Image: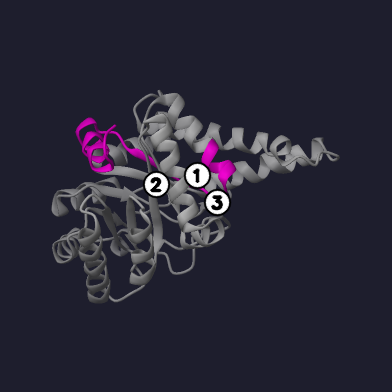
Amino acid sequence: MKTFRECVLDAVRNKTAIGHFNMANMEMLHGIFGSAKSLSVPVIIGLSEGERNFIGVRETVAVVKSLRDEHNFPIFLNADHTYSFDKVKEAVDVGFDSVIFDGTELPFEENIKITKQCVEYARSVNSEIIVEGELGFIGKSSKVLSAIPAGVKISEEFLTKSEEAERFVKGTGVDLLAPAVGNIHGMLGEGKDPALHIDRIKAIRESVGIPLVLHGGSGNSADDYKKAIFAGMVIIHISTELRVAYRKALQLSLQENPDEVAPYKYLKGAVQAVERVVTEKLKVFNGMSQV
């Protein structure tokens, strides 16, 4: 089985992207894994700080690694949006495959300083751990939005600049970079999210020399995904679309079966809904879809 680093390199060579899907409970994990396994493509399971607090960091590592070992399958675990060195250290120490330090609300130099500290610590523990940095604020909540999140500006002058990205990568030594390129966390309730700035993605990728990560991928079009991947995105994050699909399916199941009290029965539809969304995304990310 290939390592996470090897899967990233494969994606770069093949102009594909690895899907990163957030799990909020074990049912969502089963839906994500079921889809990836059926398509035989690598997948990343992401957990925000809130999701890790809810499920448990050690418990999540144990379950994901057991799936990897039992099925000999490239499923990897990422500590998504981590806002302090101590929380990064916690994820590294318990065995996460990758970590993201999110210093987008910090001054530029402070973001570099703490991100570099995270990189150095992770490398001292296990050189295989991938560390991602983030540059450019795109919001924080994974939910359905009525407008662009407060504090997020997606016009061209406010996007991550290639020269700043180059300074950031050189100053931190990160393996991956998540820039602001017109993407937003969450998804707009009416229609698709604004189009990504593909030219900016390409310019940043050429400047930094490392693969890029698209956060806030929920709500973007299949065409945008494909163009972003070709321009340099190697991992795409999806969370809000999974949450919406899960909630709608669960609500429908409870309405149709008001007397059912067995969770494994009324949660089945929610698992299947998550799996459908993941399958749709993975086909696009891996060049299997004509959409």
Label 1 vs 3, first from the N-terminus: 3
The one nearer the camera, 114 or 152, is 114
The one nearer the camera, 236 or 33, is 33
The part of the image, by quadrant, that contains residue 4 is top left
User: Which of label 3 and label 2 is nearer to you?
Assistant: 3
Which x, y percent locates residue 24? 55, 51
Q: Secondary structure at mark 2?
A: loop
Kind of residue indicated by mark 3: Ala
Which x, y percent locates residue 287? 34, 27
Q: Is residue 72 left or right of residue 22?
A: left
- Residue at left offset 70%, top offset 42%: 250
Give the alpha-carbon distance from disc 3 to disc 2, as whole Å: 27 Å
Which x, y percent locates residue 159? 30, 60
Q: Is residue 33 left or right of residue 89?
A: right
Label 3 crowd bin: few (<14), some (14–19), many (20+), radius 10 Å: some
Q: Secondary structure at mark 3?
A: loop
Give the alpha-carbon distance from disc 1 to disc 3, as whole Å: 24 Å
Give the alpha-carbon distance from disc 1 to disc 2, as whole Å: 8 Å
Q: Which residue is mark 2?
A: 195
Q: Secondary structure at mark 1?
A: loop
Q: How many marks?
A: 3
Kind of residue indicated by mark 1: Lys
Q: Is residue 155 visible?
A: no
Label 1 crowd bin: few (<14), some (14–19), many (20+), radius 10 Å: few
Q: Tell me which segment is drawn in magenta.
A: 1-30
Kind of residue indicated by mark 2: Ala
Q: Which residue is mark 3?
A: 24
- Residue at left offset 38%, top offset 57%: 94
